[in-house]
Image: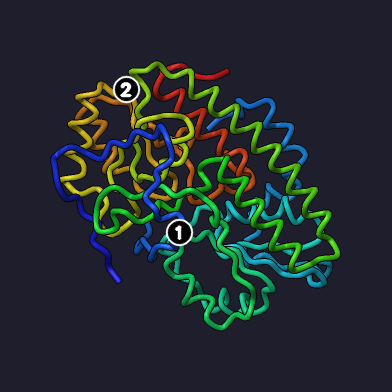
Amino acid sequence: MKMDIGQKGPSMPMISKHTSPITSGRSGLTPPALYTRRSALGLFAGAALVGLGACSKMGAKTGSMDEGASSDADSKPFVLTTFTVTRDIAANVAGDFLDVRSITKAGAEIHDYEPTPEDIKQAEGAALILNNGLGLERWFERFATDSHAERVDLSKGVDPISISEGDFAGEANPHAWMSPKNGQIYVDNMVAAFSRLDPDHASDYESNGKSYKESLEKISSELIQRLDELPTDQRTLVTCEGAFSYLCRDANLDEIYLWPVNSAEEGTPQQIAKVVQAVRDKSIPAVFCESTVSPKAMRQVADETGASLRADAEHMLYVDSLSDGDGPVPTYLELLSHDAKVIVEGLTGKESK
C-alpha cells in the first residue's frame, strides 16, 4: 500500500523545537502503521565504555534469524525481535538464559521490511516476540498472524512525539529508542516480559536490566554534555528522515528534515527546496543522512547551500539498524555515542580526539 507523505502547507520546512515533551493526549494510543518503503569514530563517552564492557557480551553480534542456533540455544526459550537495535538491548537483558534473535539483519531498512517464508516459519517457534510499536513495523501483524507467542510493544510507556506534517500528522514518531531515556523504558518492558516467560530467572533479568539501565543513564548524561557544547546558533540538526525528534527533545536541539518518515515520497523537489531555504536562512554548516536511506537528495541540499554533507561511511548517522560487528556501531550504546559525536563534529567543524 503506497502512502503519500508529501509536503503540505507553507513553504518553510518543518522545524521542531524540543524543549519539553509533547502532550497531545495520544500517549496511550498505538497509532496506525506509518511506513511503506525501503530504501564514525571512537566513542567519546568514557563512562559509557564501562557499560559497553559490562553489557555487550552479545552486542557485537546482530543475531539475525539466519544465524544457526547452537544446541545450547535450542534448549533456551526463543525470543524474537523485529530489528537489530532491540535485539542488542534484549540480548544484554537476557544474558545467557534466552536465545534472542532479530528478524532483520544489520543494515536492513525496518519500515518496509518484507518477511520471507523462512522468517515466518522460524517465528512460529518463538516463545516471545518483541516489536517496537508506535506504528514502526507496518508488516508486523501480517508476519505474526500464525504465531501464538506473547507480543510486547517495547515502546509502551514512552511519551510520544507527534509527527508534524504529511498524511500522518498527529501520529507518533516511532523512533523512540533514539533517546537513551526511552531506551530505559524498553529495558523495563523487556525485564517484565522475560520474567513472565522464564520466572526462574526473573532475578537475573532484573539484575541485568538494572546494570544496562545504568549504562544508558551514563551515556545519556554524556550525550547531553557533548551536545551542550554546540553554540546557540549551531543547534539545528538537518537530516534526511525526521528520526531524531526524541534525541533533539532530550538535548534541546532544533530539527529540520527532508521527509518526516521513510516512504515513497522521499527527496521530492518541494522537500529539497524547503530545506535548502532553511539551511541558507540559518547558515547551517552541516547536513546529515542516515545509513539506510540514499543521501542523494541531501547531497543536492549541500551542493546548493555550501553546507558540508556528512553521509560518508565514517560520518553517516545510524537509526534503524546497527552495523555489522566490525562496523562503527555494532551495539546500541555505540550507535548513540557515534551519532552524538558525528553531529557535534559536523556542526562545530572540530574533529574529536
What secondary structure is found at the residue carrying circle 1?
Answer: loop
Residue at the extreme front: 25
Instruction: Decide if residue 242 is on the left or right side of residue 118.
Output: left
Q: Position of residue 191 (x, y in %)?
A: 71, 56
Task: Identify the amino acid type marked 1.
Answer: Leu
Mark 1 or mark 2: name the one nearer the start of the chain.
Answer: 1
Q: Residue at x 33, y 26 (%)?
A: 308
**Residue bearing the label numbered 2:** 285
Q: Residue at x 46, y 64 (%)?
A: 137
**Residue bearing the label numbered 1:** 134
What secondary structure is found at the residue carrying circle 2?
Answer: loop
Q: Position of residue 346 (x, y in %)?
A: 41, 25
Packing grade of label 2 (10 A; few <14, some 14-19, many >=20) is many
Label drawn at residue 273: none
Q: Are marks 1 and 2 in contact (CB under 8 Å)?
A: no
Quarter occupied by residue 114: bottom left
Distance between mark 1 and mark 2 Cα atoms: 33 Å
Task: Identify the amino acid type marked 2.
Answer: Pro
Residue at the extreme bottom: 146
Q: Is residue 86 above or below residue 147?
A: above
